[in-house]
Image (cartoon, rainbow, N blue to C red):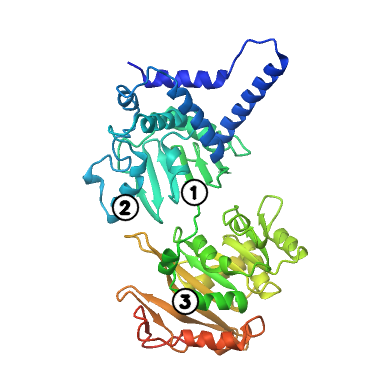
Amino acid sequence: MIKLDELIAVIEEKIKSGKKTFTSDKEKVTELQRIADREQELRIKATEGNEQARDTTRNMVFFILSEIDEITHKNIDEIISQYHLNYYQNIYTGDKQDNIKKPIDTEIEGYLQKFSISTYDTLEKKLQKLAQIVYQELFGFSILDELIFESELNEVATTRSDYVWIQYKGIKRKVPNPKFRFYSNDVYTKIIEDRIVSTANLEMNKGNPIIYSTLENGSRVTALRSPLSRYYVVNIRIFAYKSLSSKDRNRFMHQKMMEVLKILSSKGRRNIAIIGEMGSGKTTAADELVIKNLDDDLAIGLAENIHELNISGKYQDKNVIELQYADKYTPTDIMEIFFRLNRDIVIFGEVRSHMEAFEMINAMLRQARGSMCTFHSSSIPRLVHDLRKLLMQTGFYTDYREARFDIADAIDLVIQIKLDRDTGVRYVYKFAEIIANEEDMSYIIRDLFIYDKVSGKYLVNRNGISESTLNSCMEFEMTQEDREYLKGLFVLKPEEDCFSYEEEPHG
């Protein structure tokens, strides 16, 4: 009987020894050494999260396995079954219906079924799974490997070697299958310290018990160990963004609302804040609802804590410069660079710190009309209050009313995203405008669209967009024709059964 652990050791030796050939031909020796060095480089890159290197290394494992005559259709099931995780069952539920507690569990079970195999599968498919098992234990991230690189999960994380949780469509769920765990604590520790955080500048040890790093596929890693944490903890936030289909985009935000937003943002140059809870889909909304529709000739500056939006990668015709905050480059430095590079607007990835908030408000108030940010806030009124707290921390404001007014004066439109915790569906809950009054430093929030969950309809402000907002938009590229078209969008037609007027219009 072929033992899996011995097979893994054999594969490791074959890969590391490379193609050794006894020859006096110096050119051939040099070429073989070059190939060996290249393969070693690929293995390192694979561990660091490079997807191409991962595929190449895993294929190398597959080719070695396929050349072993002792592995046949008769015994391969027995070999795979020795792995501590049973891939012949659903990896999420373990094929136990008791593990399905909510409707979303059924969806996750179905989605993750692609990682399971059947005894009726072909030898090639089983060899592919065996190659994955060998690869993930030798060079990958063990049981987390496929979830990180071959799924559309939002997050994959552990709190112990036997506790794995995932975030799917914004909903956090513990993997209920008791066998979905690391083989041992030692393996768990090794995977985190030697592989998952391998791209970090610092070594993970007692003196550095928390590590922040980024895998080459863009996933953001946070890892902890003692003495800071009782157990080893790792959190991997995955940014495998895919563009929404037109059907999903309409579910996210109705076409009528998208038309309003498109004109106000691209032609009216309104400053926009997209808010919501963590995992609600703010980044997706920023891309799909705003960035995608920006004029290609608009000079964009993108400031982020970590490169997440990847505007230049998805929209190669857009004039964008993407900068990331670092130890030596503060939000103030980044903004100065953008202004020197003559950026028309600035897009701020999620605003978190007081100086990020300060520079964002400054940019919106000064020469970067049409800028945008995302912000973690539970409601539109809370957005103003939460940003006010951050501005007060800068020391540049002594009067909270002045800070509050600057926020209201800077942000023109707010889109609030919500997540249905039962279904995982993300949707626009509110679309509102903020109008500041300089005379008494007050402001009002006018809801333009509000989603009513009971009726499943959007309640529309029958008065439409305020005249003050429309007048301000006319100072930019918006025409009188656009203005009339916008007004018409707030006049409901009999066939528009997904909208109804508010009984008591706001503002």
Q: Quadrant of the N terminus?
A: top left
* Mark carried by residue 257: 3
285 over 29 or under it: above or below:
below
Q: Nearer the viewer, residue 55 or 188?
A: 55
Q: Nearer the viewer, mark 2 or mark 1?
A: 2
Residue closer to the observer: 151 or 388 = 151
* Amino acid on which the number 2 mark rests in the picture: Glu
Measured Cα–Cα span from mark 1 to mark 3: 30 Å
CA separation in Å, label 2 and label 1: 20 Å
Q: Residues within 10 Å of mark 2 (few under 14, many from 20)?
A: some
Mark 1 closeness class: few <14, some 14–19, many ≥20 residues within 10 Å: many
34 to the left or right of 342: left
User: Would residue 491 be found to the left or right of residue 408 on screen?
Assistant: left
State the image coordinates of residue 322 (x, y, percent, origin top left): 66, 57
- To which quarter of the image does residue 20 belong? top right
Q: Percent from the top left, x then y, of residue 240?
A: 50, 50
Amino acid type of the residue tagged 1 in the rendering:
Arg
* SS for dot 2: helix
Q: Residue at x 27, y 54 (%)?
A: 102
In this orientation, does residue 407 appear?
Answer: no
Q: Which residue occupies the foreground of this view, 354 or 461?
A: 461
The residue at which mark 1 appears reads as 237
Q: Secondary structure at mark 3?
A: helix
Within-10-Å neighbours for mark 3: few <14, some 14–19, many 20+: some
On the image, the x and y values in percent for residue 343 come to 71, 66
Residue positioned 46% across, 77% down in the render: 256
Mark 2 vs mark 3: which is more N-terminal? Answer: 2
Kindly identify which numbered label has been placed on residue 107. Answer: 2
- Percent x, y for residue 129? 39, 32
The amino acid type, in three-letter code, at marker 3 is Met
Q: Is residue 243 above or below residue 360?
A: above
